[in-house]
Image (cartoon, helix red, strand yellow):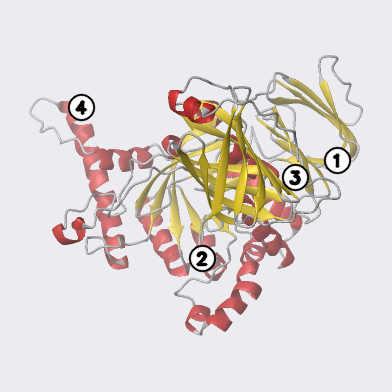
Amino acid sequence: MPRKILKQTVPGVCLFLLISLQAQLSPQESLHRVWAVKDCRILSLSGPAVEKGSIIIRNGLIEAVGPNIPIPPDAEVIDGAKLTAWPGFTDALGQSLLKWPEEKFDAAKIYSGDFTDKDKGITPELKAFDLVNLGKAAIEKYHTHGITAAEVLPDKGVLTGQASFFSLGAPDKNKALLLKENAFGIGFSPAGFLVYPNSLMGVVAYLRQAFSDASYHALAKSRWQKEMRGSERPDYNGQQEILAGYAASKKSFIFLCRNQHDIRRALSLADDWKIDFFIADLGSEASLVIPELKKSKAKVLCTVAFKAPGTSLYSQLGKEQREKAEKDIYPKNPARLAEAGIPFAFSSLGTDDPKSFIEGIQKAVEAGLPREKALDALTGAPALFFGLDKALGTIEPGKIANLVLATGDPLTKDAKTRYVFADGQKFELKEAKAKEGEKPAVNVSGKWELSVEGGLKLTVEFMQEEGALSGKMTTPFGAFDFTGGTVSGKEVYFEMNITVGGQQLDLYFSATVEGDTMRGSVVQGTQGSAEFTGKRIP
């Protein structure tokens, strides 16, 4: 186990501290602002590989890179002799960093018909910036797989909301933000109730009318602002203001397309509206409409779940044919786009966890996508797409210090991330291992209820892979992810950072497991400990 916990006999102290908010522990941030990675192999993606060179990072930026670089006297040095450096990956479109408030649907609406715009999937006011969660456990999952930046978008409904772009180096979203409300999501998913638009035809009709109304509203507002006297003032309409604002400012719209037919609909709408846009290829069928994509000069955000849409021929032929297509045909979608010269970047939508995202890209490489194209789709392409190519995408002087140090080559299965720099902040990733000679003797995967002395009830969903432990804990204050836990023999250990009333608390759990029960202690920093028991939920 990573550390030995020294317990203090302070009954109920964790419960007391969680409720009274009397202890506040600041997130751990590096005090160092100057780093030197020495003698590493460098894949800058802006030129030839450097077999032995150094990278100097100062105040969040890359100061120098190359062979024979002098090491500044004020730098903290990382020995990179056995490591390869490459630019941090970018998730060009995802939603798993969003933390949604818990809401219960009022079934009485079905009988009353009193549905809200949210029920209809019309939520243009939703902002990724307001919903994003950049807590320690959340971004650690991304860092483990070399991802240091992400475009985040609410993805449900018709007018889904507004995206923002983050560099994953700080838990403070204000510090992590690179682009705020830089793109707007449009989906083709009808509402699930007997309410307009509840059909695909209705969705398309609604979208055309919404943009027409927004255009008319903008013209009427502009005319009134110029003339005022003798001119009728238009009523304020927030939704139309948002749509008109995005179109007028030439910000991008992201069409969330479930299949090839949605892509054709999106291309038609984009041509009518004369807007800047992306095609988010959720159904991995963009390669079936390559001539149309070329004609429209479309940019594609490729997902890598490789699940056949329900409208596909393979789905209609039955389970066996569908699964065969998902294994042999759909993973070739990125390779066909690359061969046709269609610009694309990778999106985690559909996989919605970093591990599955990277594994999907590896499948695409195995299916024929050149590795260098895959790397570009994770680095240079998304930076260019979102106008950040002067800041991200390569390891060059003056760019943001988002980079990965790992054993092995990028996108290979033997590559292990050792360090990540995001916005110049260093994160060291240690491989979770059980004690030497002690393999796990228990498997705690599944849901558990923990009872902390004093009456606090917690629910934990554990995910165990050999000796590594991760999961999600649900508390009265919200749900929180954790990674980096261990299982050694019958002992489990994990730690997590939670937010209570705007304050962050570090908690350390250790326990012994016997069958479907566990017994242990939870420690809050140096503030004391409390005993807990746990039972597996069938």
* CA distance separating discs 2 and 3: 35 Å
Disc nearest the viewer among 2 and 3: 3
The reply to whether the C-beta atoms of the residues labelled 2 and 1 are less than 8 Å apart is: no
At numbered mark 3, what does the secondary structure look like: helix, strand or loop? loop
Left or right: residue 308 compared with residue 218: right
Q: Earlier in the sequence, mark 4 or mark 1?
A: 1
From the image, tell me which residue sits under label 2: 283
The image position of residue 122, as x and y in percent, is 30, 50
Instruction: Say which amino acid is labelled 3.
Output: Ala
Q: Nearer the viewer, residue 154 or 430?
A: 430
Q: Which residue is mark 3?
A: 432
Amino acid found under the numbered disc labelled 1: Leu
Residue 114 visible: yes
Q: Are marks 2 and 4 in contact (CB under 8 Å)?
A: no
Q: Along the polypeptide, which appears first: circle 2 or circle 1?
A: 1
Q: Nearer the viewer, mark 4 or mark 1?
A: 1
Q: Which residue is pictured at 57% across the width and 82% down the height?
A: 321
Mark 4 or 3 closer to N-term?
4
Q: Secondary structure at mark 1?
A: loop
Q: Residues within 10 Å of mark 2 (few under 14, many from 20)?
A: many
Q: Which mark, residue 226?
A: 4
User: Circle 1 is placed at which residue position?
Assistant: 83
Q: CA distance from mark 2 to mark 1?
A: 37 Å
